[in-house]
Image (spheres, rainbow, N blue to C red):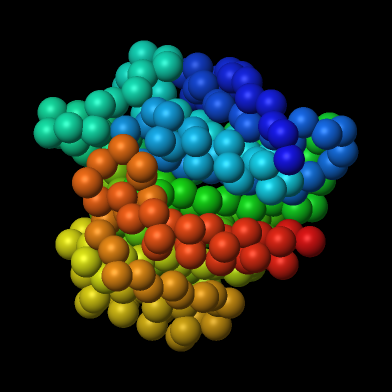
Amino acid sequence: MQITTRNLGLTVDDSLMRVYVAAPKPEGTYPGILYYSDIYQLGRPITRLADRLAGYGYVVAAPEIFHRLEPIGTVIEPNDLGRLRGNDAARRTEIAAYDADARAVLDWLKQDPNVSPAKLGTMGFCIGGHLACRAALQPDVQAAVCCYPTGIHSGKLGRDPADTLPRISEIHGEVLLIFGTLDPHVPAAGRQTIVETLQTTGVSHHVLLYDADHTFMRDDGPRFDPVATDCAWDEIIEFFNRTLA
């Protein structure tokens, strides 16, 4: 379906957070998705993916994850310097700040007239995959899609050690984990740690493995894999359609 896009501002901890919103154009009430970028924030490769999800019938709200450190509207270039800049911003952001941002966007989705407040999910890529998993700790999140999430297995997310894995039993909804077998940032041992924890705690989950590299869903770089991306999208839409029906 056709979509609309806009930007809105939410103030969190006295910092203005830009949120990119993509939503179905037809009038109606739809599930809401808290949607996370990778370390490069909201460039077009990321917003194109948000637009695509919205076209399937979801209100997608994507916050700038480094709004406390970067000027509003900043898109970090995906090159060597950008990688250093993005990783440094991630390192300097407190875990509590990430959690406060998640709560702010979820609360906004719940009051939006086009969102069904009982149907909330989350999705993210790379660090955003970790943030999506962490957002699933919120009791009103029913479904989480975590695409090649970094730092869950190692406890690395921000300024403080992340307690996401020890708290995984707090997830009430379902989790879909998407990994590339060639991803050096989430090696096989790390994937196994995450999956074993989910199994031990009884959290409902599904794991998809593709013969692909890290960030294989970004369409602006050499690691882009269109076949794996299309296959992953089929699974993502089926997952959200089922869990947020």
Question: Which of 228 and 5 lies nearest the eye of the viewer?
Answer: 228
In the displayed orientation, state which residue is furthest to the right.
Answer: 28
Q: Is residue 30 left or right of residue 55?
A: right
In the displayed orientation, state which residue is furthest to the top.
Answer: 71
Residue 195's place in the image compared with 5, above or below, is below
In the displayed orientation, state which residue is furthest to the bottom.
Answer: 200
Q: Give residue 191's quadrant in the image.
A: bottom left
In percent of width and height, residue 80 lies at 12, 33
Would residue 103 be seen by someone viewing this image from the given angle? no
**From the image, which quarter does the C terminus lie in?**
bottom right
Question: Which of 162 and 224 lies nearest the eye of the viewer?
Answer: 224
In percent of width and height, residue 166 lies at 40, 68
Q: Is residue 216 left or right of residue 231?
A: left
Question: Which of 15 and 230 lies nearest the eye of the viewer?
Answer: 230
Q: Give residue 153's quadrant in the image.
A: bottom left
In percent of width and height, residue 30 lies at 79, 45
Residue at image coords 36%, 14%: 71
Residue 237's place in the image compared with 77, above or below, is below
Residue at image coords 57%, 51%: 122
**From the image, which quarter does the N terminus lie in?**
top right
In the displayed orientation, state which residue is furthest to the left.
Answer: 80
Residue at image coords 47%, 18%: 15
Q: Report the label total.
A: 0
Question: Which of 82 and 107 lies nearest the eye of the viewer?
Answer: 82
Would residue 47 be seen by someone viewing this image from the given angle? yes
Residue at image coords 60%, 45%: 53
Residue 2's place in the image compared with 117, above or below, is above
In percent of width and height, residue 19 lies at 55, 26
